[in-house]
Amino acid sequence: MTGTELDHPLDHAAAPDHAAAVDPAAGTAAAAGTAVDMNALLGGHDILFVTLDTLRYDVAAEAVEQGRTPQLARVLPGGRWERRHTPASFTYAAHQAFFAGFLPTPTVPGRHERLFAAAFPGSETSTGRTWVFEEPDVVTALRGAGYHTLCLGGVGFFNRASALGSVLPDLFDEDHWRREFGVTHPDPLRAQLDQLRASAAALPADRPLFTFLNVAALHQPNRHHLPGATQDSRDSHAAALAYVDTRMPELFALVTGRGRPCFAIVCADHGTAYGEDGHTGHRLGHEVVWTVPYAQFTLRPGEW
């Protein structure tokens, strides 16, 4: 397996929140911080979980303000990313935490209600709206709830090139990784979405689908997304995000094309440094690494 700061060699060979509950069958995206009852979503909604690997919050927020990500702006609650703190500073650790129910946490002080959680004694952030399961991770729990679980990997922790690179994919009923999904390909989402289309078409229409998509384009190296760039930079990181945005309509059309609403979580697993205070990369404790963009919303058939 490769290192975590530069996660590639060429191509990866609190007091509970008592806000009013939201009707999971009603409307479009809820405002940031609005409670969602995951128990009520199960079975009736497909679920999409997208990690925009390595995406910095500041770059994501600026891209929305500058109009560089119009497709994402269309689904973001209030047209803005929510600023959150990730539980880990690199891909593997962050995803282990995410799948156990520890999604990025709002940066405002307090104990924040979780969407879902693996059961353990003494939890103070699970409420009646939290889907609490006995399994150690949400992927296994969703399989037990009748979902087909699909992993479309991006960075090297999903490539099965090593025992470590097989740990996360092993959680899923179906997983895919090809070189075209990885960090050095100029259009990795195209290949991932082609696979999503094929996998969804093979699934019985009445079986709910959980799609996990790890997007590698933002991770180093990303200079190929910025014409003329000879090294990775904050600007090439932003250019990679603009590329990702162009593929969002196809993604959202695919996940709603099965005729049922789809609850979506889109966030970064961590950020990355481009020279701030002498730091480069991630797996380090800097604000640009710990602070990530987050959004959750419901997509409906016919919207895309």
Image: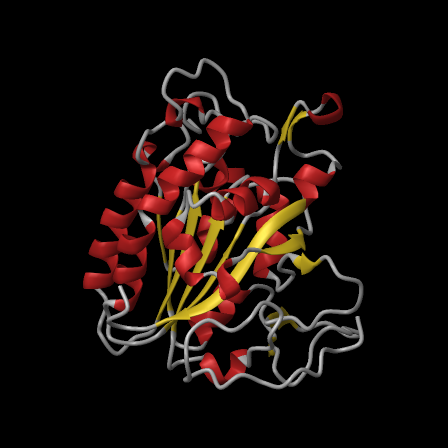
Using the image, determine if residue 52 lies above or below residue 222: below
Using the image, determine if residue 192 lies above or below residue 162: below
- Any part of residue 7 in sight: no
The chosen color scheme is secondary structure
Question: Residue 27 vs residue 55: left or right?
Answer: left
Q: Which residue is found at the position 67% from the left and 39% from the top?
A: 289
The image position of residue 192, as x and y in percent, is 30, 45
Question: Residue 152 vs residue 288: left or right?
Answer: left
Question: Residue 112 vs residue 13: left or right?
Answer: right
Q: Which residue is found at the position 57% from the left and 63% from the top?
A: 137
The image position of residue 256, as x and y in percent, is 29, 68
Q: Which of 282 and 226 lies nearest the eye of the viewer?
A: 226
The image position of residue 279, as x and y in percent, is 71, 24
Q: Which residue is found at the position 26% from the left and 78% from the top?
A: 206
For the image, the number of numbered tags is 0
Q: Quadrant of residue 259?
A: bottom left
Using the image, determine if residue 61 lies above or below residue 274: below
The image position of residue 273, as x and y in percent, is 64, 30
Question: Residue 226 vs residue 5: left or right?
Answer: left
Using the image, determine if residue 180 lies above or below residue 174: above
- Any part of residue 122 in sight: yes
